Amino acid sequence: MDETTTAGPAPATTVGPAPVGPAPAGTAPVGPAPAGTAVAAESGGWLELLADDCSPGDIQRLRAALLAGADDATRRRVESEAQLAETIRARLADRGRDARELRVRDDLVRRLASLRDSAGLLQEVVAQSRFLLGVDVAYIMLPTADGGRLRIDIVDGSLGDTLQGVVLRDGEGLGGEVMRSGRPLWSESYLDDGRLRRVRSVDSIAVSEHLGGILGVPLRFGRSTLGVLLAADRRPRRFSDHEVELLAGLAAHAAVALRNAQLFEENQRAVADLRQSNEALKRTDELRRRAGELREQLTAEVLRGGGIPEVGRAVARAVGLPVQVLGADGARLDAGPGTDDIDVVAVTGSAPERWLSGQEPASRTAIGRDHLAVVPIRMRDGCAGCLVAVSDVRIGDETVRLLEIGAMTAALVVATERSVAEAELRTRGAFVTALLAGDGDDAELRRRAVAADIDIDAIGVVVVLDNAGQDERAVAAAATRIAAELHGWVAQHADRFVVLARQHDVASVRARIAALGDGDLPAAGGIAPAAGGVAAVRTAHEAARQTAAVLLALKLPGAVATAAEVGPYRSLFSHAGRDDIAAFVEAALGPVLAYDRARGRDLATTLEAFLGQSQHHARTCEQLCIHPNTLYQRLERIGELLGTGWREPGRTLQLQLALHLRGLAQTLAPDVGRRGNTP
């Protein structure tokens, strides 16, 4: 460096004392002396020169002017005065620099105290760090949420965005070491410093940013280190103690301001949480008010004798949304206004039974653009249905709570209706039992019919639902729906449900029952016509019962048929019919059956499987799980017993019919007299 650069005044962004002492030997002032220097030389004083804020060159020029032609004593005095003037000038320069730095720091402290946003505060800190230290780049590293790493969050002076988001662990790089130790640290040339634990990815970023000298100081608040403030040049640089202290002082102010900003933000969040809590309390109070009003309305409806439709309409008014009530089978239980346009299957993509069966959570759920709330009607013995509400906006917890209140009232209504229905069912069941068992004369039975609210002369069709005692609740529900559809009465008799209908068209009744069950009832249904009166109802009931029993025997548990449709099989229920069938079976299969009885074999089953598989050997072996040789031996024995020609079409048809009737007779034989019946 030349003399002007070494001894000239420090720039605004350069920190550090200027060199002190006489000019090097052999140097001479450059250019003509300014007028002020001449005046000072003539007066022989240095104060005028220092008062004019002179430069080191001005002092050297005055010194040269005073030494020209001076004797030894004068030269010693001038040299001493010149050195003293240099010292005073340097100290004045230091004071000026300190004053400038103090003004900048005071201004920064005032601005930091006014900032409440952490990001804005940190951005101001890095900008002032660049200004005060005269560096190319300044940045701040803050701990990540997990507390185990540091991330560069705020950068000023970067060539690009490569520094933003860089992550270091404690002890890695210069910033990680400062964070670990809690003490300032600087490196004259970061990429060549072997003291630091290097990270390859960070080194590549330092190369792209051309980073040289780096100074890092901790952001300390009390005993806590909140982060690291770093200042870097794009050339090697040694940082003086004054620069370290300057950046550390700035970091101390920044740490206090940062902590204050964090506390302010925490306070703001606390205020927001408190405001939300107050709003939640207001909503809770409003919900309690609305819930109380809804309970009063529902109580009034129930006391007036209202049912499920009235409950649905009251809940719809309370929530301000269309509401519908579905049964456990997904069918509508209400007919409230404004609910016909809700297609739950179209909205959800599945039937409500998914919620009722537990396949979906029975709570609020959003589907597509619509929001659907499904709240179950819970009973002690299971789910009796659900309340459904649909909205174009998200359904809130308050609405769900009101729906739950409605569901509890609906459960009470359903329980009451069940109790009434069960009482009526018991009363009618006692009457039907007496009617069908022949207890009492006609006059007594008619009086009991009037007490059970049954018009015995109006009965035109008798329906019997039989599922062999399985799933009684489902069969009872189906019988109730059939009775309501046919405007008749329902009762339970001998583990079966009997519907006494006012209709007289058997074909129409059959079609309507099939439609109600969607082609599959929970029980076999037998239908028989009745002409009205005690005897006719008994006869029709027996025919319908036998029809249902035949359907079960034919393995058609969900089918419905009239007595005429199973006429040929009904002969199995009479003694004469069973005797005729037994004779037919004996004539066709007698030798085989006798062989089985005598030897404990089951050739009849083998014969039935062989004919059922169209005399296909491999399929028969697979069905019976036997070896082909075993099948051939059994078929040879059957041929010996039945004689030649037993495989001819006419003979096989006779054998299959005999086997089929034999199986039905064995199935239906226990039904004669079963569950209290008589042939």
Image: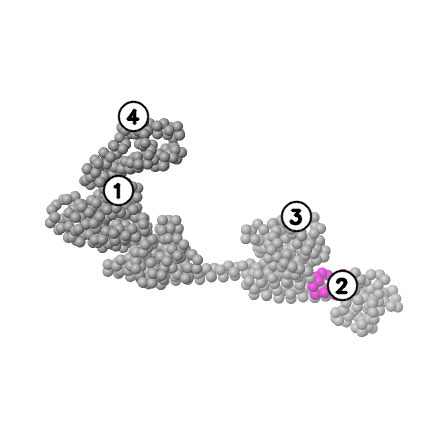
Q: Which residue is mark 4?
A: 599
Say what amino acid the circle numbered 1 marks. Answer: Val
Whichever of callouts 3 and 1 sits on the residue coming sooner in the sequence is 3
Q: Is residue 231 visible?
A: yes
Q: Residues within 10 Å of mark 1 (few under 14, many from 20)?
A: many
Q: Residue at x 88, y 66 (%)?
A: 71
Left or right: 430 in relation to 662: left
Q: Secondary structure at mark 4?
A: helix
Say what amino acid the circle numbered 4 marks. Answer: Arg
| Label 4 to label 2: alpha-carbon separation | 137 Å
170 vs 154, nearest the viewer: 154
Q: Residues within 10 Å of mark 2 (few under 14, many from 20)?
A: some
Q: Magenta segment range?
A: 5-22
Q: How many marks?
A: 4
Give the x, y percent position of residue 655: 29, 35
Q: Secondary structure at mark 2?
A: helix
